[in-house]
């Protein structure tokens, strides 16, 4: 399928699920989205299932209480009405549908092709003085840099945790925060260090980070 057709199909699908406000449609959308998420042949579909599940669950629970309407369930101060249930199902269905559709688009089309197509589609905006090339060029460069930034962050984390037997979740979060702040600073000050260069030496970068931390 052509890239433009995929993007157009995703856009139409997103508009449809955002416009339709029907309980049965929302239940079907939520069920089908979960089913596709679970049985999709490409395992990358299920990557990040924990944050996806938390997001959908939070969306559902965050909309199921404190709405007017006919009371369905009453649990002390917590009251579920027909309007709140419809709102929760609708928004959870929309979120799940958009996530699965976006994942399918990303799995079947490269990021570079998507950005290039969006850049072409937005070219008419230049006629009214809106420059989009710089934005999409920056987006393309950012996408290319992400794997290298992720790789360096992993090396920095391993260098900080080297020699530690057991690390708790809180300590991991603390170490991660301590790594991200100087890493983001380094990205802004020396972006050329994160260019897609196969000769990059992450071990050397990690050593520099350790020396920087000791001197700081």
Image (cartoon, rainbow, N blue to C red):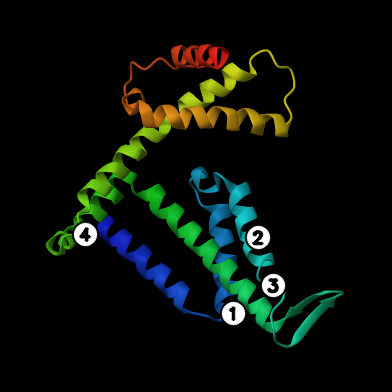
Q: How far, Cα to Cα, is label 1 from label 4? A: 35 Å
At a point 57% along the width and 12% down the height, the residue shown is 214
User: Label 4: which residue?
Assistant: 121
Quadrant that contains the N terminus: bottom left
| CA distance for labels 3 and 1 | 16 Å
- The answer for how far apart the CA atoms under marks 4 and 2 are is 35 Å
- Callout 2–callout 3 Cβ contact below 8 Å: no
- The residue tagged 2 is 58
Sequence-wise, the earlier of marks 1 and 4 is: 1
Residues marked 4 and 2 touching at CB (< 8 Å): no
Q: Can residue 110 be spotted in the picture? A: no
Counting from the top left corner in percent of width and height, residue 215 is at: 54, 12
Which residue was labeled with disc 1?
Answer: 24
Looking at marks 4 and 2 on the same chain, the residue that comes earlier in the sequence is marked by 2
Element under disc 2: helix
Classify residue 65 as left or right of residue 181: right
178, 117: nearer the viewer: 178
Residue 7 at x, y percent in the picture? 32, 60
The answer to whether the residue labelled 3 contacts the one labelled 1, judged by CB atoms less than 8 Å apart, is no
Could you tell me which residue is drawn at 29 percent across and 42 percent down?
A: 138
Which residue shows up at 64% across the image and 72% down it? 88
Residue that badge 3 annotates: 64
């Amino acid at each position: 399928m052509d890239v433009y057709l995929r993007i157009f199909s995703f856009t139409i699908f997103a508009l449809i699920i955002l416009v339709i406000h029907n309980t049965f449609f929302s239940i079907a959308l939520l069920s089908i989205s979960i089913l596709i998420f679970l049985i999709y042949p490409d395992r990358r579909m299920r990557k990040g299932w924990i944050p996806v599940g938390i997001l959908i669950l939070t969306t559902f629970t965050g909309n199921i209480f404190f709405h007017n309407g006919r009371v369905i369930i009453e649990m002390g101060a917590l009251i579920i009405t027909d309007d709140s249930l419809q709102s929760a199902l609708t928004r959870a269905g929309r979120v799940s549908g958009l996530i699965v559709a976006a994942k399918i688009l990303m799995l079947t089309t490269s990021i570079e092709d998507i950005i290039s197509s969006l850049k072409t589609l937005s070219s008419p905006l230049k006629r009214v003085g809106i420059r989009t090339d710089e934005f999409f060029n920056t987006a393309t460069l950012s996408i290319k840099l992400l794997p290298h930034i992720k790789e360096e962050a992993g090396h920095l984390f391993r260098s900080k945790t080297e020699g530690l037997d057991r690390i708790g979740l809180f300590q991991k979060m603390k170490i991660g925060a301590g790594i991200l702040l100087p890493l983001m600073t380094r990205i802004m000050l020396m972006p050329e260090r994160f260019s897609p260069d196969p000769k990059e030496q992450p071990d050397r970068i990690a050593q520099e980070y350790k020396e920087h931390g000791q001197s700081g």
